[in-house]
Each structure stands twice: as C-alpha cells, then as structure tokens.
Amino acid sequence: MQFIVLAGLAAGAAGLHLRTADKQRGLIDESLKRPADPGAPENTGGGAEAPFSLESLAEMISVDQALHIYNLPYGDDPQPPSVIFIDARERDHYVKGHIPAAYHVIPQSFVNDTLPADMEFWPKDSVIVVYCSGGDCDASHLVRTRLIHERLFTRVFIMEAGLPGWIDAQLPTEPGEPPN
Amino acid sequence: MSTACGTSVSTSKGARLGLLAARWLMGGLFLFSGAAKLGWLKALGGMAILSPIADQGIDPYTFAGSIKGFDILHNDLIPYVTFLVPWLEVLCALALLIGLATRGAARLIAALLVLFCLAMVTVIIRKIDVECTCFGNFLGGEVNWTSILRNIVLLAIIWPVAHYGAGMLAVEHILLAPGAPRGE
C-alpha cells in the first residue's frame, strides 16, 4: 500500500512538473527528433560530386563535408565564416586525441557553466561542427540542440561518423588539454 | 528480529540504530540524486561556497539524454521517465529521512536500484558507450561493472530497511497507535 501511494504521488508530481517545465520539455522533444535515416546518401558525402555549399548542408554531415568546413578559413573567400569544431566526448577521450583546435564541450557543460570562456564572443552565424564517437553516440546531438536553442547559434552541424571517421580518413588529430 | 505473529520488529538498540543509519544514508543520497536530476542543485550555483555541490547537478534535459543513450525505452516514454524517476527518488528519500511509509519507500528505492542494474547490464553487453548520470555528475562516468557493483552495495544497505522497517526516530512510530507493531 505504501509502495502504491508513494508511486502515485511521484507520478502526480512528475506529471505536474512535466506540464510546467516548458523549456526543458522543448529541449527533450527536440533531441528526440532524430533524422529518420541518418544513413541516407545525402547525409553521407553524397555531395562529393557537387560543389560544396554551406547552405545545402543537412544537420548530419560527412567527414568530407567537415573537412571542407575545417579548411574554409584558409580558402579563397576574403571573408570566411568563423569555424568552430567541438568535441563532445568525455574529457579523457578528448585529451588522448581530438581534431586540432577543437573545443571540448559536453552536454553537462551547459548545466555546470563550464563552457568555453570565449563562447559569448563567437558570432551567432559561426559554422560549428560537433562530433563525438559516431554511431550511437548522442552527446553531439545533445550539445547541438543546446547550442541552437539556448545559445542561438544558427549553423551547427554534426559530423556523423565522429572522430573514428575522421581518423579513418587519415586526417590529423592532436592530443592535449582543452583550451577552455 | 521477527515477532511471534510474523511482523518484523527491530528490538535491539544496535539494530534499530543501524536501520536509522541506513535510512538516513540512503535518504540523503537519493534526495541528492533526485534533486541533481531535476536541476535543483544548479540553483545553488549562485553561492560560491555551494558551487561544488551545484556542479554535481544536471537538468532534466541532460538526464533525458542519458536515458536515451541506454537505448531501452521508446522515445515517447523518455520525457515521462525523465521526470518520474527523480520524483520517485525525492519522495522516497523524504519518506526515509523522516521515517514515514518507510518500508514502502525502501522497497521502491530497491526496485529502482534493481531496474538500474538491469539497464546497466544491457548497456555493457551491447557495448554501448553511455554516461551514467545516476547521481547527476556525482560518481559519474561511463556505465561499467563498477557502477553495477555500486548499486548492489546500495541495495544491500536499503534491503534491511525494506524488510525490518524504520528502526528508531520515525514519524510513523508517533502516528501508529500505542502497542501496534513498529516498522509496518
């Protein structure tokens, strides 16, 4: 009887909280809307033949597309966009090796205020690429959702293959502590 | 510790003290755990002296992400479980701390621990890399066999309370009629 009463009270409190916590509910619902088919050709380098265009990119990008973004500041554009890479894996994994110059931001960073100190100076239209371990790793999605909905960045992408895909493409990584 | 009629009563002072200690330990831990997941600890961040405690807190969104990472529940259920689990923890913790509906609270906590252990086992078997936000950022890190062992230890601590009752200093002792069995 006590078991049932407590469970019922908890369910009632949780239901009430869920109804009133609009912001949290919005973030949760957004994060649960995953791409229907993340393996679809247009998300995995299908743009390799067409000229690269930021405007045509979907939420999930390939390693090739991430590399294009990484090289934007060094290209022909006289006013390249601000490009930021974010590693959303655990700190130990980041320290062992990450994409050069990537920041370290995990989902808990938004709650504990351990975000990069210079994030407030990042232009809101910066091109941000978030990655984690690829596959079923959700950390990059969680970070992306917060960047868009809480920090109001408008161009945030996820490198679907994660760091393993970057390494498989024989692209450079570097070890070291996070700059933030 | 059982009476002749089969009800569970703690008679020795040491046993009752042990039950009290178990109640308060688990009550404190799960109050912290529930508050951490509901984002309440974050509110303490404004005071520098409490920021180490605030840093252990997360919020429902982060907890939902962790649940999703376990890849057990359907997405439609995740928002409800996100809020139900911490509220269960908070209410059961309060019940344990004050000694009211103690056995029911202890049994609920034990049930939660068993569920958490089973979920962790499936994650380890499926080799899923997921962050354990069981107690917010406190004792965090990836789910592994140590996490399961920890939960088994907690289960061992709460089990006597679930079986024998509140011990001493319990509100339910005051509410029960004189002469009625304690710890029911």
Image: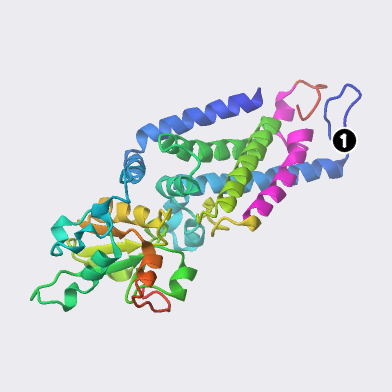
Q: Residue at x 41, y 56 (%)?
A: A135
Nearer-the-camera pick, B51 or B136: B136
- Residue A36 position in % (x across, y down): 31, 43
In which quadrant will I find the C terminus of chain A? bottom left
In which quadrant will I find the N terminus of chain A? top right
Nearer-the-camera pick, B61 or A114: B61
Q: Residue beneath label 1, please?
A: B11
Name the residue at the right extreme. B4
- Residue A93 position in % (x across, y down): 47, 69
State yes or no: residue B169 in magenta: yes
The relative height of residue B147 versus residue B113 in the rendered view (above or below) is below
Q: Residue at x 38, y 61 (%)?
A: A113
Q: Is residue A35 left or right of residue B154?
A: left
Q: In which image quadrant can residue A153 be found?
A: bottom left
Q: Residue at x 47, y 51 (%)?
A: B41
The relative height of residue B119 versus residue A137 in the rendered view (above or below) is above
Residue stretch in magenta: B147-176
Name the residue at the front extreme. A49
- Residue A143 position in % (x across, y down): 35, 56
Q: Is residue B171 visible?
A: no
What secondary structure do most residues of the magenta stretch adopt?
helix
| Mark count | 1
- Residue B37 position in % (x across, y down): 48, 47
Label 1 sits on a secondary structure element that is loop
Q: Chain of mark 1?
A: B
Q: Is residue A103 left or right of residue B85?
A: left
Q: Residue at x 31, y 51 (%)?
A: A145
The relative height of residue A179 versus residue A12 in the rendered view (above or below) is below
Display coloring: rainbow
**Type of amino acid at the residue the image marks with label 1:** Thr
